[in-house]
Amino acid sequence: MKTSLSFVSPLNFLRQRFFFATLALSPILLFNYRKLQRDRRTFGKLLVFSFINVPSFVATLIGLANEGSGIASVLTYTQPLFVFALAIPFLKEKVTSFRVLGGMIGFVGIVVLSFRALGFFSLGSTITLLLGALLWAVANVYYKKYMTQTDPLVANFFQLLVGTLLLSVLCLCINDYVFPTNLTYLSTMLYASVGALSVGWTIWLVLLRSEDATILAGSSFLVPLIALFLGWILLAEGIDLQSALGSALVLVGVYLVNVKKKNN
């Protein structure tokens, strides 16, 4: 995403991501149209979910555009900590001391992994990234509490469609409709839209239906860790002692978040 933002603005990039992701899911939804829930209550819940989650994407990308990837990663992955705080009063999930400890250790691991890239950061982008993380957490809790009976594919498609429409209007107002044909941009757009949004977010919602929100949120600490190892394998980036320590902390944190599930 950081690479793509060197070509276009955050709003335009996100509009294009949503558009291509919606396009990719459309044939599946059309094929299963008769099976879809079309009552007013479901429609209302889908709207609420979309109006929470779409601003989360917007805030995260705006923050990322104005901040380094290191601090952006750390602030974005405060999301599990917000989920832990919200799951107790709203979902009545059993947030044990092991899960809390695991969440804290996992977050420290993210900080260690990103420490070299942190440096100086601005208050505005910090607040924006934290807002994105908070809205992501609220969207997760809302979906878990009110929408587990809604097909994850439908929920994802609907939020992508709403995001496409809203961002198209915004980009039209500011005359921001540039679409680069650079091969690097096209390849990152393909992955960021079809891969991350169409496939990745549908899988996320499928897991959220059946798993505790705290478990899934804590497991998301693995994302920066996977990025580290992909950089090592694909980009020949080195893994030093700091990276190894951060990785170990992340794995311990994720283990502690998940291990009590088997014992409860």
Image (cartoon, rainbow, N blue to C red):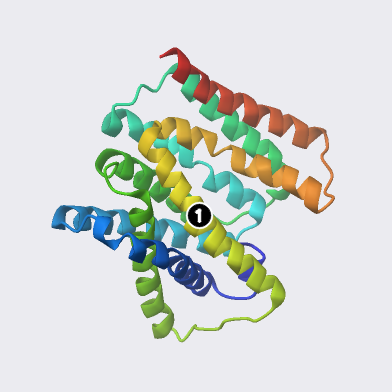
Q: At x 35% / y 73%, what residue is drawn? A: 165
Name the element at disc 1: helix
Q: Give residue 199's position: percent from left, percent from top.
A: 50, 54
Extreme residue in the left direction:
40
Taking the view exactly as shown, the residue that stands out farthest to the top is 263
Q: How many numbered markers are drawn?
A: 1
- Kindly indicate the quadrant of the structure image that contains residue 249: top right
Quadrant location, the C terminus: top left
> How crowded is the residue under tag 1: few (<14 C-alpha within 10 Å), some, or many (20+)?
some
Q: Left or right: 132 with respect to 37?
A: right
Q: From the image, which quarter does the N terminus lie in?
A: bottom right
Who's the residue at 41% across and 43% down the image? 206
User: Which residue is the extreme one toward the bottom?
Assistant: 175
Type of amino acid at the residue the image marks with label 1? Val
Question: Compared to 49, does 176 lie above or below?
Answer: below
The x and y percentages for residue 150 are 28, 48
- Is residue 156 placed above or below 242 in the rendered structure? below
Q: In the rendered view, does 54 fall on the left or right side of 177?
A: left
Horizontal and vertical percent for residue 154?
A: 33, 56
Q: Is residue 116 visible?
A: no
Can residue 111 be seen in this snapshot? yes
Which image quadrant is residue 252 in? top right
At 35% from the left and 72% from the top, the residue drawn is 166
Q: Position of residue 128 (x, y in %)?
A: 47, 56
Vertical position of residue 65 compared to residue 241: above or below: below
At 35% from the left and 48% from the top, the residue drawn is: 139
> Toward the viewer: 234 or 172?
234
Residue at numbered disc 1: 199
Q: Nearer the viewer, residue 76 or 261?
A: 261
